[in-house]
Image: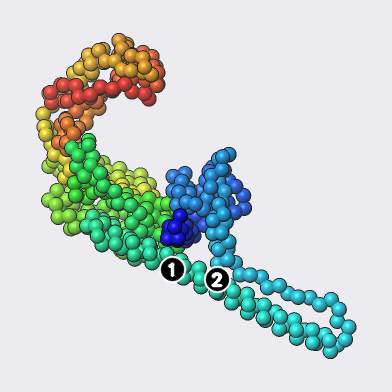
Amino acid sequence: MSGSEEETAEEESYSTMFSSLRHPARRKILRMLSEKSMTFSEMLDNLAIPSSHLTYHLENLGELVIKKEDGKYKLSSFGEAAVVMMKGAEEVPEVQKKNFSSLPLRWKSLFAILIIGIVILAGMSYGQFATNSQLSKDYNTLGASLEKVQSQNQQLLSGNSSAYEAMNMIKDVFQINVAKYQVTLLSDTEKPVPDLGGINEEVLTYSLVNNESDINVIVMFRDGNFSLFQLSLVEGVPAFAPIYTQPQSMDFFTTARGIMANYASLENESYLNEMRQFLSSANETQQTQTMGNMKLETSISGGNAQFVFYYTDNGIDFSTKSLEIVFQNGILTSFTDDWSLYSIGSTQVTVSQDQAIQIARNAANTFSWNASGVQISNVTVLQQPVSAVFLSFPQTDTTILYPYWYVTLYINQVYTGGINSIGVGIWANSGQVANIQALSS
């Protein structure tokens, strides 16, 4: 390895160390492992956080933590060095006091007392100097690392129009006061979605951290349009509350109306204004209401609430073409808008529920599947139980919706893989079988 490569590796190692020491959960993991090796479950019990969060923190600790063959985690030599540096920044060295056991004469006593006083003062001064010097070095190092992270993050934010729009959604629509957090763009991924005709899907994940909590926010765009806001607590004390720029109402209808007003103002879409009017005149005691081609379903229970708008036409509810607002423990945790993403291909229904079930039975009688190399066919379909659910679904890999029946039929025995039923999808406007598959439940 060349000198420049060694310097780069060393710089990456120190960057990992300082990044880990900034996060309270990872500092706690390092402290626990400095005392003894621990299994994943033992750390999970001590930290009282979801397993996915512990996995996330262990991945970010990188070379500081080693997993042994017995499944326990321990500190690497670099991790031990990180703990030493962490303790050096947190603990003030104790001053050793010198004792004199033999003081025969009065004047020697006074002299000895004077010497002890000088030693104590000198020791305190040296200890304070050493501590301040170490803290200063650590502070400067952490500061430089933080500036580097913030600089890289600022480049991501300034060079990406989606990131700029995502931050506007977080601040202006959902009114989270980002000035009260250290905001980091953790990831920004893009990929086509085959099931939606290959449209582009971009997902941005943010970390909002302060002294009290660590919050993750996901913002998703589909085909360049906002699709999802999701908020979750990584670390903190439930029930947590994000810091907002404006006081939040305790009434769910009032809060939902405010969010819709902010969203409609930013996006300026006609359907959003219709939803605003609908929500402003909605009967708060009625769970299902219809206005034109919109249906609103509301569900409120204690600190949880859900508002769902979806498209309806000719007696058909196209629940996929929807906008949904979800509150948990009094906090907005999810806002989804796929209304503009989907269009309607047909509102005609020529197949009844009974007809759909019979079509499904006919298809199941000739259906076969492979289970661990064995071809299964000629199964016996039970008359009961049976279920038929009316949905809306794209006929091909597009975003155009058609009325659709999904029928679940149960068979007389359980086959390899726990297969005990057959699911059949049927187009409600033509009666054609869309798909059929073996199911386990």
Could you say which disc has been placed on residue 342 in the image? Answer: none
Disc 2 element: helix
Nearest the viewer among 6 and 62 is: 6
* Quadrant for the C terminus in the image: top left
Nearest the viewer among 337 and 219 is: 219
Farthest right residue in view: 104
Distance from disc 2 to disc 1, alpha carbons, whole Å, reads: 14 Å
Write down the quadrant of residue 384 in the picture.
top left
Check disc 2 and give the amino acid type: Gln
* Quadrant for the N terminus in the image: bottom left
Residue 215 seen in this snapshot = yes
Write down the quadrant of residue 299 in the picture.
top left
Percent from the top left, x then y, of residue 373? 36, 17
> Residue placed at 63% from the left, 75% from the top?
127
Image: 275 above or below 149: above
> Residue placed at 46% from the left, 70% from the top?
140
Image: 106 above or below 132: below
Percent from the top left, x then y, of residue 422? 30, 20
> Residue placed at 19% from the left, 46% from the top?
223
The residue wearing badge 2 is 134
Query: Is 277 left or right of 4, judged from the image as shown?
Result: left
Query: Is 37 left or right of 228, judged from the image as shown?
Result: right
Could you say which disc has been placed on residue 143 in the image? Answer: 1
Residue 181 seen in this snapshot = no
Query: Is 145 left or right of 341, judged from the image as shown?
Result: right
Percent from the top left, x then y, of residue 136? 51, 73
Percent from the top left, x then y, of residue 42? 56, 44
Disc 1 element: helix
Image: 315 above or below 88: above
Crowdedness near tag 1: few (<14), some (14–19) or many (≥20) residues, C-alpha within 10 Å = few
> Residue placed at 31% from the left, 21% from the top?
438
